[in-house]
Amino acid sequence: MALKLVACPQCGDSVEWKPENRFRPFCSERCKLMDLGAWATERYRVPVAESDESEIPADEDPAPRPN
Ligand SMILES: [Zn+2]
């Protein structure tokens, strides 16, 4: 039975594709968490930044007129 090697999507290292490797296709838990973290950060960053920027200028109203 030959071992199947795959490339870790995070660091590109060679990973043995075997049932004992529960982090596959990643080489380690660290690479797996980094990949998931990057994905989640991308996903959450967009809506948060958008609502933040559109609400701040709308609330700021220079009401008092200099007269
Ligand atoms: Zn890796």
Image (cartoon, rainbow, N blue to C red):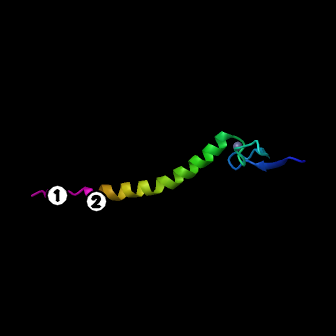
Image region (quadrant) for ligand 1:
top right
Q: Nearer the viewer, residue 9 or 3?
A: 3
Task: Give whichever of discs 1 and 2 has the lower sequence position.
Answer: 2
Picture disc at residue 63: 1
- Up the image or down, 24 lies above or below 64; here it is above
Magenta span contains residue 59: yes
Identify which amino acid the numbered label 2 is placed on.
Answer: Ala
Q: Amino acid under label 1?
A: Ala
Q: In the rendered structure, find residue 58 and report the number of the disc placed on it.
A: 2
Query: Which residue appears at 79% of the width and 45% of the height?
Result: 18
Q: Residues within 10 Å of mark 2 (few under 14, many from 20)?
A: few
- Which quadrant of the figure contains the C terminus? bottom left
Residue depth check, mark 1 versus mark 2: number of the one nearer the observer: 2
Q: Where is residue 28 drawn, in percent x and y?
A: 70, 40
Residue range in magenta is: 58-67
Q: CA distance from mark 1 to mark 2?
A: 13 Å
Q: How would you classify the magenta stretch by its main secondary structure? A: loop
State the SS at label 1.
loop
Tag 1 and tag 2, C-beta contact below 8 Å: no
